[in-house]
Each structure stands twice: as C-alpha cells, then as structure tokens.
Amino acid sequence: MKITVIGAGNVGATAALRIAEKQLAKEVVLIDIVEGIPQGKALDMYESGAVALFDTCVIGSNDYKDSADSDIILITAGLARKPGMTREDLLNKNAAIIRDVTIQVMKYSRNPIIIMVSNPLDVMTYVARKTSGLPKERVIGMAGVLDAARFRSFIAEALNVSMQDINAFVLGGHGDSMVPVVKYTNVAGIPLTELLPQDKIDAIVERTRNGGIEIVNLLKTGSAFYAPAASAVEMIEAIVKDRKRILPCTTALEGQYGIDNVYCGVPVKLGKNGVEQILEINLSPSELEALQKSAAEVKENCNSLAALLA
Ligand SMILES: NC(=O)c1ccc[n+]([C@@H]2O[C@H](COP(=O)([O-])OP(=O)(O)OC[C@H]3O[C@@H](n4cnc5c(N)ncnc54)[C@H](O)[C@@H]3O)[C@@H](O)[C@H]2O)c1
Ligand SMILES: O=C(O)C[C@H](O)C(=O)O
C-alpha cells in the first residue's frame, strides 16, 4: 500500500503522521510546491518512528514522480480560510490548484482512490473527478466524518458520556447549509431526543454547522486540522482494511435523494473499492428539503467553474 498526501501543510502533515503511526501504508509520500517543507517534515516524521514504533517509510518531495503507483491520494493542497471568509471565498483559487494537482497525480498513478480535503469541499471533489476521469466510486470527499465528529463531541460534552457511544450523521454540502440529522443520532442506541431537550439539541446543531468557523476565529491564521486529519485517516483506514464502514462522505449522487449529478455528503459504505454503496435513508420532509437545497448550492458553484474545466 502506497499513500500520497498532496499538501504538506497543517492537515496534510498531520494526516501523513497519523497514517504512518497507524501503519496503514508501507510508504507515505508527502508532496508540496514549497521546497524543503515536505522533505523536512517527512524526515522528521520518519525519525519519530524509532520512538513511536512504526516502520512506515515517509518521503517528502516536490516531484510528482515520487507519487508513482499510489493506491490512495489524499489531496489537502490549497488555501485555508481566515476570519471573515467563507469556504466559498476559496473557490476559484483552490479550483485552479486542485485541477493542476489532479493532472499531476494522474500522470503517475493509473487508478488511485482520491480523497479530497481542500475547500470548498464538495466542489473540489467534483473538480478532481472531472479532471481525473476516474470512476465516481474512486473520488471521495471528506467532510461528513468531521462534521459528525464535531456533532458527537458536543453531544458527549452535554451529556458527560463517552464520544464512542454516540452515533450521528451530518449530511449535505460542507458549508453553512449542512444537515445534521437528529433523527438518526443516538447514544448507545437511545435516541438523542430522549436524552436532551429540543432547545439544547438545536444549540448543538447550530454549533456543529459553525464548527469550522469557530476554530478559524480562534486560530486566526488558518483553519482546523487535527480533527480533519483524523477524519480523513478514518476514511483511509476503512479503505485500506476493506472494513465496509458506513460513514458520511461526499460522493456523486445520481438520482438518490432526488438529487442528480451533484457531489454531496450522504451515508456510504467505504471499502477497498472506495464508495461501494450509497445508502438512502428515510429523511423527514424538512431534512430532505434542506439536503436538496444544500446540493443545489454545490451545483451552482460547480457550474461557475465551467470555463476552467472545459
Ligand atoms: N474538508 C474539510 O473538512 C476540511 C477541513 C480542514 C481543512 N480543509 C481545507 O484543506 C485545505 C488545506 O488546509 P490546511 O490547514 O492544511 O492549509 P495549509 O495552508 O496549512 O496547507 C496547505 C498546503 O498546500 C500547499 N499547496 C498550495 N498550493 C499547492 C499546489 N499547487 N501543489 C501542492 N501543494 C500546494 C501549501 O504550500 C501548503 O503547504 C484548505 O483548503 C482547507 O480549507 C478542509
Ligand atoms: O472551516 C474551514 O474553513 C475548514 C474546514 O472546512 C472545517 O470545517 O474545519
């Protein structure tokens, strides 16, 4: 197993280290445009193996040749937002970066699984799919796992229980219109609505929707990276170990949920082939409407890139 991480910044470097520590690959390649950064970070990570006890080979490079024959490519390259910005403010600059990066990786890996992290997430997943020509199952966006992790952590805090026992889904695009699905959220099987009053649930849902900007406003220089990297690596682990995990991921919808030809976050089965199944769960009329509205916003942004992707 060879995994390449594009972008040796906060998310990319954290994810690369986590992949190495979990020994999910024999080789991890970290690539960035800035000279010295991927090489220095990769060497530092590799040396940590002696104490963290892993044998994964970690290599840093500015040359895409070193990504040759990767099984999985995690794309984290691009700009992160700062206070006062929305993820959509990154649209045009990051679309150009993701297009270039995808062209480069596809020169050296024939049939990789691409996991997208760069924002705005759903649109960048579409850019990578359109540019790579890979089957839809092999180009997947990471956002739902992160948004659900935030939702779960806030519920755990409110109830003073372990995060491990909380199951939750956050669907839709990774933006202000995301849809935390309360109906399917439970604590060790007990519906959340039996454990918390509605006003508390509403406050947690709102905090989840604003989870990204809450951290941007604290950090001031960039956005979250520990939980995002952990979330991307959870997806990678499901694929590497063919675990058939059911996780909310961004995938191409073709009629499911009444949404056609749009990348959007829904529950999927993740295994060695990437997205092996899209699960269509029953949503309330208002949740379905919110999901469709979120997808429509993603579609509009995708359409705005027609000239770049022509
Ligand atoms: N999907 C999510 O839930 C989620 C979560 C966190 C961050 N993000 C997004 O991930 C991206 C990265 O965030 P970060 O915090 O790691 O940012 P960062 O600034 O720390 O790192 C980005 C890295 O990309 C590199 N880069 C820029 N252009 C490149 C190119 N053409 N080729 C290769 N490398 C290039 C930069 O040199 C930098 O090292 C941002 O777009 C951010 O919004 C998404
Ligand atoms: O909020 C951001 O800009 C980064 C990421 O999408 C997040 O949710 O943390």
Image (tube, helix red, strand yellow):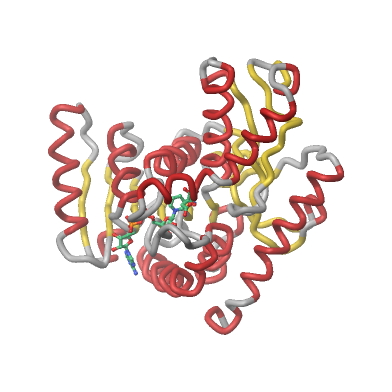
Which residue is at a point 52% across and 48% down the rendered structure image?
A: 142
Q: Name which quarter of the figure residue 83 lies in.
A: bottom left
The image shows residue 26, relative to residue 243, as above or below, that is below
Q: Give the mark count.
A: 0
Q: Could you say where residue 58 lies in the image, as x and y percent from the top left? A: 22, 46
Q: Quadrant of the N terminus?
A: top left
Q: Of 102 and 149, which appears nearest the observer? A: 149
Q: Can you give x and y, in whole percent of width and height, for residue 102 in the image?
A: 43, 67
Q: Residue at x 45, y 43 (%)?
A: 232
Q: Residue reaching furthest right?
A: 285
Relative to 135, residue 224 above or below: above
Q: Residue at x 54, y 56 (%)?
A: 139
- Quadrant, the C terminus: bottom right
Residue 9, horizontal then vertical, whole percent = 30, 54
Query: Which x, y percent locates residue 241?
Result: 46, 33
Classify the position of ligand 1 by quadrant: top left, top right, bottom left or bottom right.
bottom left
Q: In the image, 297: left or right of 118?
A: right
User: Residue drawn 27% across and 62% down?
Assistant: 32
**Position of 153 relative to 283 (above/below):** above
